[in-house]
Every structure is written in structure tokens, then in C-alpha cells.
Amino acid sequence: MATSAISHADQVPSDHAEKRGLWSWITTVDHKRIGILYGATAFIFFLMGGIEALLIRWQLARPENTFLSPELYNELFTMHGTTMIFLAVMPLSAAFFNYFIPLQLGARDVAFPRLNAFSYWVFLLGGLWLNISFLFNAAPNAGWFGYANLTTNQFSPGLNIDFWMIGLQILGVASLAAAVNFFTTVVNLRAKGMKFMRMPMFTWMSFITQVLLLLAFPVITVALILLMFDRFFGTHFYIPASGGDPILWQHLFWIFGHPEVYILILPAFGVVSEVLPVFSRKPLFGYAAMVFSGIFIAFLGFGVWAHHMFATGMGPIADTAFSLTTMLIAIPTGVKIFNWLGTMAGGSLQMKTPLLFSIGFIAMFIIGGLSGVMHASPPADLQQTDSYFIVAHFHYVLFGGSIFALTSGAYYWWPKMFGRMLDEKIGKVHFWLMLIAFNLTFFPMHFVGLHGMPRRVYTYPAGLGFETMNMLETVGALLLALSQAIFIWNIIKAWRGPRNAPADPWNGATLEWAIPSPPQEFNFAVEPEVHSRDPLWEQKRQQGPLPEPERVGGQGIHLPNPSFWPLLTATGVAGIFISMMMIQFLGWWFVVAMVLWFLFSVYNWIFEPA
Amino acid sequence: MALWTRVACRFRRWVPAVLIPLATAACIGTSTQYPQSTLHPKSDFTRLIDGVLMNTVWAAIVVFILVEGALVWVVFRYRGKPNDPEPRQVHGNTTLEIIWTAIPALLLAIISVPTVKAIFQTYEVPKDALTVEVIGHQWWWEFRYPEYGVRTADEMHVPVGKMVLLKMKTEDVLHSFWSPEFAGKRDLFPNRTNTLWFTADTTGYFSGQCAEFCGTQHGRMGFEIKSTSPEEFDAYIKGLQATAPKAAADSAATAPSAGEPTRVSTLAAATRQLDPAEQAAVDSGAKIFRMCSACHSLDATTTANMIGPNLANIASRRYLAARTLRNTPENLASWIYDPQAIKHGVIMPKLGLTHEQATMVAKYLQTHR
């Protein structure tokens, strides 16, 4: 029985009472609180990336506009891309991994709770370091994929690229540590009876994402280390005049960069695969096909990187190979879309905000997928790559895809995380405005791109026919900002309201809905056991509606102690990278000091009783 | 029901049928509305690309209508109420799943055949073509005609109906040559030569620009291709070749050892009679230009690799500074006066000339057609 034993637990208040205060957040190792930290931080970065986007759109609203200088424009589009990918979408997914993988598995925490806190702090420091660059008037300015040889000292002498490269290295440590953690969690901490083929689809897709992270991030790390050596220590990996090769960067970057795309979208697939069955009141259609198509997508994701490089002239054999593997990915992706349709067909659709966002996700992702098939063809890509058509495409999959799905997840899981429901009416306004504004912003980009507008240009001349569509896009972007303001209003309204969400507001199927909203620190008073894919539905079918679970004392449940060593170790890791960047100003002693500080923190971490 | 609503209802189904083609036509537009468009190919190469793309576009439109249609239908058909009985708990359907795996696979297989064929065609290096070497610079384009021993900047002339082979390389960072009407796009690397080919089938000016982010002024790295009749093209090449003696004469006349110059722009003056005041301004401009010749050559046949664009036929080009400004005497003078104010970050510094001096240099350059 999933969780019926909760009521037998002790009622006496205990040391598992809800903790408060700043210090409790700094030292927390609770996966739920770390999830909230990830979510809040990522949402702030998301808003910053959004403001950058608005400035970009304002500049492009009219031809020959002088609102932004070219230098600032280049910094803004670089930081917009870097922020949205590394500081918004990835950590928003990580917020859900943190909060819901253990809950869906029926576990009390992740496998390595202190490592989890460490990941968050490293992520925060990396994100801050990237953005502090603005204060030095040296924000990164070579685009989010920073192609060599523009990034060499000769062509980018300032600190801009250093901030980018060091910031990404720091973030990479956070991602890798988190990936090890969640991978281990899924392998080892599944509830009794939860075989792999009984895992909830969100956890499945997140699990695949961890594998992608583990395999893809080492490659960008290597690429960045080579760049770091070129910039700091005078090597020539990417410098053609000395026998290096700038195309090496492109291969390394995209071997990371394409799996990265799936790192951004697979968790979204997972969220949608949770929401659709619950609001259709019907199990996921083709569970096994969904699992294996996810694995297949991830596997193929490592074999398509050079489709970002069709214009580099790799030759007909390489072009053909990468074109065909890329087209192949459309098949498992199609399977997913059809299975989602199959899930809804024959169901009884409850038109709540989470479902609306998931439907919006499917509708937009189809468009992004189809434009993707168009430039899977190298000849067609010779016109489309690096144009606004590509900008349209990846916003359809990343915003229309990931962000719509993550917003769906936010509405779905908000009551569980905060014990408060988000308002349905405001939610629906939010959805419709976001859907319309999104299409107004990004649909014309397909055409403005096909009509010859390259991406990353800080202005364009009048007379090329770009004016009307750019103006429409800017209006759309402003409306999109308004839709986010409505979301924030909804959050504030819920925040001020009472904590009155039931444990299971949507008639959920998975274990997180069996425990109080928000869950207690130990999650499950009694470790659950599962016998099917939708354990809660099965239980409700057998026992009728479940009573609201009570909050219990949870005596005798061992949880890891709070610790500030993860934070201090994180400052050591970030410090080592930052000190490398500062060698020219501070010399080697600072590097040595940071390494010692890191070792000191790790030592204390190891010998602190957990 | 009012008459108009009945009429509206009756014709409602026709609205999309009328609106969709209209909207599509409006978006595709004409080449006058969209003079830098990939949707109005003007060469064999871009028509080849367009053919491949259009196969996919039509397939995509069909898939889009079917799948989005299915989505909308499912959403409306299965809308439920909270108190509805639990729907039938279906877990999957193997036949269906095999069908919707196989159909996309088949569709992609069909699309991939013309794609692969076109890939190999795009890489065929044509024989008996006019070679143009394209060299990318931050932030301007150099075009060389090795068969004729001449070079120019930012404006490439090609004869209509003749196969052109572009051999491309960069002097500094990566760039991407993008001519939407003629040649599509190809990246420029410092350590390898990339090629594109095309045969223009229309005469006129067609614009293009750099498509790979290449630093501060990536947005101002445009060029034009002028496609002309073969006769005009021959005249163009002859004109470029004829800049050599003129540049040599000017250089000799303004040399410090030559004393006070009398008439420098001998060739220019021969083609266009200038009044004495104008001629004096041109002569002073020529003298000042000696400073500029550290980076710019007025000789299209030079083999020296200069830092700045070749200016041998500057007065006949439509634009200045990689399609940043229209080429007017006033614009040319303001550019010479302070290029940083117009295109911040370019290698050319503000030279410290007065407005009058800049105007004189501009007048001198105006004689170089």
C-alpha cells in the first residue's frame, strides 16, 4: 500500500518541525528547500534574461536604431542566450529534479544531500560571476557558442571572454555534481516495488537527462580548458596562425551543445507526460514507447552535432551522414507527440491551467520540430543557418517547448511545493496571453529570416523589408513580458493567501500526492511500496478517495544534519576558477590560496558527522 | 438570425481557404518588397536549394495541418467535466504505435532522397568558371579576380549567365558569406578555402551580408553583387585594370620630392572637366591621401595585401564601408572625417583631419571611378 501507514505514525512534535530563518536556508541539505532555491534563483535569472531580450527587441524595433551601441547589443544577446540556457531553463528543470525525483521515487532525500547543496551554491556563484561582468563593463560578447578564433586574445583582448569561459566552467561543476547525484538517486533510492519500468515519466526523462549531462559536460569542459590555456598560458589550440584550428572548437562545442538541447527539452517532455494523464484522467499512452523514444532521442543526440556546421563545408559525405541522423530524431519525437495525443484521446480533459500549458507545449513544439526538419537538409540550411529562421526555430522548441512545459509544471506542482494553489482564472489569462504573445514575437522571425535577416546583427538598413515584422516582434515581446508579470502577480497573490492546498488537488497518480502539501522534511513517514505505474490511482481505486494525510512527528527518522561546508567548498571551487582569471592582476599566490581553501573545506566536509 | 450572420456562417468555411493563401502570398512577397530574400532565387544554385526546401515545406505544411488538427480535435472532442465518470483506462495500442512510427519514417525517407542528391550537387566544383576570391575582413569584403589580376571591395561584379566559382577565406576571424539570391551561405575560415558556385540569371544589384558573428560591427558587414551583361563586365574589368597607371601617376605627382603638385588627377581630369577651384581641392585631397595610402590602394592591380579596402573604383560603388552608407560625396567626407562615429570599432581611426580636408580627400576619391 502506498502510504496508508502514515496515520499510524507518532503524533508528538519533534525535531522535524518546519525550519525558518536565513541560516536554515544557507545550511540546508533538504532536497525540497534546495529545489526551491534553484527555482527562485533560476526564475530571477529568467527575468534578467527576459529584460535583456526586451532591450534587444527595442533596439531592433526600427531600422538604423541607435538605442543600443553595437558593443552593448553584442553583450546583451550573448548574455541573453547564456542566461536562458545555463541560468534559467537548466536550473528550472533542476528545481523540479530536486523537489520531485525523490518524492516520485518515494525517497526521503537524494543520494548525496550535501553534494546537492554544493551543486546549488556552485551554480549560484557561477551565475553571479557571469553577471558581475556587467559591473566591470566587460560582459561576454561573442555569442553563447563563442566561436573561436573570435574568442582568442588577439580579437577579444578584454575580460569579456574570460568572464564567460570561467563562468561556464563553474556552472559545469554544478551540473556534473548534480548529475552524479540524481543518477545515483534514481538507481539506488527507488521505493520498494518501483522497478525501472514503473517509474513516473518525469523521473524517467530526468534520469535520461542526467546521463546526457554526465556525457556532454566533460566535452565542454575540455573545450573551455583548451580555450583557457590559449587565453591565459599562450597555447594555440584554436589559433590558425600557429597551426591550431578554429573548427576544433565548433566540433567540441556542438558535441556538448546538441545533447545540451535535449538536456533542456527532456525534462519538459517529462513534465508534460505527468500532466497529460492526470488531467485526462487516463494513464499515459504507450509508456514503454515513451521511455524508449526518450532513450533513443538521447542516444541520437550525440550523433547529430555537426548539423550546426553544415555551412562550414565539411564535404558531402559528412553532410549526408549528419543530415540523415538528424532526420532520424524526428521519428522518436513524433512518437512522443502521437502518444501524448493518444493519452488525451478518449480521456475526460479537465481544462485546468497546467493542462493548457501542456497543450500549448505540444502545439508549439510541433512547429519547432517541423522547422527543425527543414534545416536538417544541408542545402536548405545553407540559406537558413545563422538567420532569424533559426532564431524562430529554437525559440519554438526552447520557449514554446521547455518554458511552456516548465510553466505547466509550475502550475501543477505549486500546491505541493508551497501548500497554496495558484489562481485558475489568472492562470488562464496568463496562458492565453503568453501563447498569443509568443507567436506574435517568434512566428514572423521565420519569414524575416527567410527574407535575408541574419541573426546577431545590432541593426538593419531600411528597405530590405524587415521593418514591419521586426516591429510586430517587438510588440509581441512586450506582451510576453506582460504575461510574465501576470504570472508573478499570480505567485504574489498565492503567497499572500492562506496555506490551504490539499495533498492531492488534481487527483494525481504518483507518490508525491500522497503526502501533505507542502511535504514534511522527511517526505514519507513510512517508506512507501508500489505495485504499479500509477500507485496512487491504484490505491484510490481499491480504497476510494484517500483521507487528507496528517502531519506527524516522524520520531526516529534519521535525516542528514544541516551543514555550511557545501557552501564553503563551493566558494573554494568558484574561487579556484576565478583566481585563474585573476592571475594577471593578483599573481599565483591567489590560486594557491584558493586551492588550500578548497582542500580545507573538503576536509571539514568529510569529517563532519552527517 | 440577422441576414449578415447567416451569410457569414454560410461562408465561414471558405474564410481559411481564402485567408491562408493570401497570408502566405503576403509573407512570401515580391523581390521588390524583399530585396535580400532566399524566397526569390536568382541563380541555378539557389533554385536547387529552393527546390529541396520547398519539398520539405509542403510536407511540413501537410504534417502541420494533420497533427495540429488532430490536437485541436482531441482537445475539443474530449473536454470533460469534473464529475464525469472515469474514462476507459487505455494503456496503449501497439498497432497504432507502429503506424505512427512508420509513417514519419517513410516521409523522411522520401524527403531525404532529393536532399542527399542536392548535397552532392552543391559540392560539385564546376569547370570553366569565372573564379572570384572572397576574403573576409573585420568588417568588409575583398573580392579578387585572379584571372584578370584585379581586386576590389564590397561590390562584386559578375557576368550574367556565366558560372562563377567563389573561393573563400578570411584574413582574421570567421565570417560567413551570404548571398540569399545567388549563392546561399558558406563560412570563411583562416586556414582552409571554402567554395560556392552560381550562375546568375538576372541582371541588377543584389545585396548580401556576413552571417557569422564576427565582432563589434558584424551588423555592418554587407556587400552587393552586381550582375551585368558580359560586355559591361568586360568594361568593368578593363576599367579596374586601367587604374594602375593612374594610381602610379598620382603617386609620383604627390611624392614629397615632386614639389608643389600641379595637376594630379590627370586621367580623371581628362574624362571630366573640372573648374579650377574644384581641381585645386582635388589636388590638395590627393596630397592628403598619401597618408591614407598606408592602408588603402588606388591601384586595383596591386598584389600588396593592404589593411584597408582597395579604393580604385570607389566613386562607382553604390555604398561605402560594407553597405553602411550610401555613396554620396557628403557621406564619403563624413566617413573620412570620423569613421568611428559612424561604425564604431572599425580599424580606421579618426585621422584628425578638418572637415575641409576630409572634403578635399572625398573630392579626390570621387575622381576614382
Image (cartoon, grey):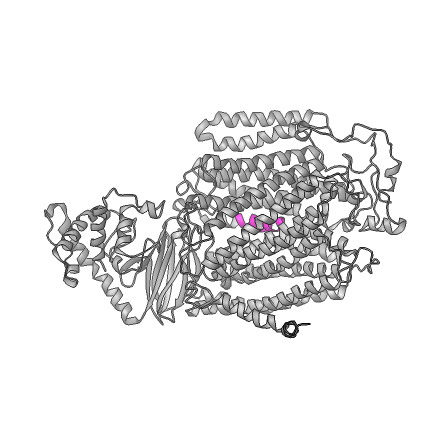
Residue A572 drawn at (x, y percent): 58, 29
Decide: is B242 above or below A519.
Answer: below
Magenta residues span A253-265
* Nearer to the camera, A28 or A112: A28
Main SS class of the magenta portion in the image: helix
Residue A441 in which image quadrant: bottom right
Magenta segment includes A258: yes
Q: Is residue B22 left or right of residue A105?
A: left
Magenta segment includes B53: no
Query: Residue lying furthest front in this view?
Result: B2
Residue A442 drawn at (x, y percent): 55, 56
Decide: is B82 above or below A158.
Answer: below
Say whether residue A207 is visible: no
Say whether residue A34 is visible: yes
Decide: is B216 above or below B21.
Answer: above
Residue B140 drawn at (x, y percent): 35, 53
- Dividing the image into 4 quarters, which one contains the N terminus of chain A? top right
Q: Is residue A306 left or right of residue A554?
A: left
Q: Is residue B217 left or right of residue A330?
A: left
* Nearer to the camera, A156 or B146: A156
Residue B315 in which image quadrant: bottom left
Residue A186 drawn at (x, y percent): 73, 43
Q: Is residue B41 left or right of residue A488?
A: left
* Nearer to the camera, A254 or A29: A29
Decide: is A315 above or below B114.
Answer: above
